[in-house]
Image (cartoon, grey):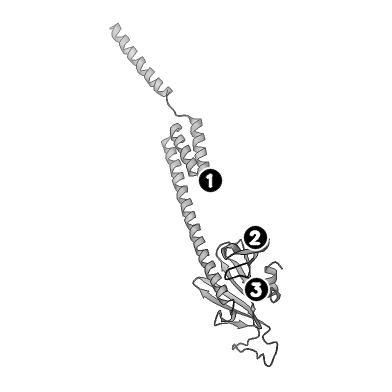
């Protein structure tokens, strides 16, 4: 009976040793777990999913709480989905802006030789309510005035302004959906870059350039680093006829 009790005791001790030995070989480590999950979240926040994946695997090595690991995985998946949607939306906005830019270049270049034909609904300073125009034969200065017209193209609206006595004094304008530099419209050289006030006390860049070749060669442009901001393509002589435009163009 004594030997039987000893054998039972030894078996119990052996089992305990095995359990304790197994626990001693466990890779779980609370400090390393915390480091891994924190680093994973920082990488996810910065959009570095390669690093996030490496530290996520490390978290699975050292963390015991499977529920917390599942939450971490969900955070990674959700952030990746949000980033993907944001990139897709950005690409869509860029494509839409490129389309408007292309239409604007075509509108200005195809009408620069005859801005008075850009629209059938031109209005000029001095026209009466019925659309009657002053007679230059009776008044030699009758054509010394600005004329304007608007034309729509899809969701975009383009304006043309010109001096009635000299149609080479002209300007074309529109609003561009996204911040756009001159480079998007053609080869150019910079004339001036400066800051202008924006909303909430901030400021944005405004650029003035001169196109050196292509369909807009010789004309200048003013555009800015704000969304839905006006963009202008004009002959330099137009600034002498429009004080407000001269101010917009930086003098």
Residue 234: where, in percent of width, then height?
63, 72
Q: Earlier in the sequence, mark 2 or mark 1?
A: 1
User: The N terminus lies in which quarter of the figure?
Assistant: top left
Q: Earlier in the sequence, mark 3 or mark 2?
A: 2
Q: Residues within 10 Å of mark 3 (few under 14, many from 20)?
A: some
Report the label total.
Answer: 3
Circle on res. 235: 3
Q: Is residue 103 above or below residue 162?
A: above
Residue 110: where, in percent of width, then height?
55, 75
Q: CA distance from mark 2 to mark 1?
A: 27 Å
Q: Nearer the viewer, residue 48 or 6?
A: 48
Residue at 52% over, 45% down: 45
Which residue bears the numbered disc 1?
A: 46
Q: Is residue 222 left or right of residue 29?
A: right
Q: Secondary structure at mark 2?
A: strand
Q: Residue furthest top?
A: 2
Q: Nearer the viewer, residue 67 or 21?
A: 21
Which residue bears the numbered disc 2?
A: 205
Residue 92: where, in percent of width, then height?
48, 60
Q: Residue furthest front?
A: 213
């Amino acid at each position: 009976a004594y030997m039987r009790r000893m054998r039972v005791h030894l078996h119990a001790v052996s089992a305990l040793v095995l359990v304790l030995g197994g626990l001693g070989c466990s890779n779980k480590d609370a400090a390393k777990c915390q480091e891994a999950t924190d680093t994973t979240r920082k990488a996810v926040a910065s959009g570095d999913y390669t690093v996030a994946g490496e530290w996520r695997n490390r978290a699975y090595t050292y963390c015991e709480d499977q529920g917390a690991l599942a939450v971490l995985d969900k955070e990674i998946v959700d952030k990746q989905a949000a980033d993907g949607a944001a990139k897709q939306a950005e690409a869509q906005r860029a494509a839409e802006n490129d389309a408007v830019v292309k239409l604007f270049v075509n509108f200005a270049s195809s009408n620069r030789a005859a801005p008075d034909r850009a629209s059938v609904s031109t209005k000029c300073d001095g026209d009466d309510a019925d659309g009657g125009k002053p007679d230059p034969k009776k008044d030699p200065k009758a054509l010394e005035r600005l004329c304007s017209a608007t034309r729509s193209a899809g969701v975009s609206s383009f304006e043309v302004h010109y001096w009635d006595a000299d149609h080479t004094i002209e300007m074309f304008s529109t609003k561009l959906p996204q911040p756009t530099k001159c480079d998007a419209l053609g080869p150019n050289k910079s004339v001036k870059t400066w800051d202008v006030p924006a909303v909430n006390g901030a400021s944005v860049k405004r650029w003035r350039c001169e196109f050196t070749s292509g369909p807009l060669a010789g004309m200048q442009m003013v555009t800015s680093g704000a969304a839905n901001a006006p963009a202008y393509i004009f002959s330099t002589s137009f600034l002498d006829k429009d004080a407000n435009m001269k101010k917009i163009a930086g003098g």
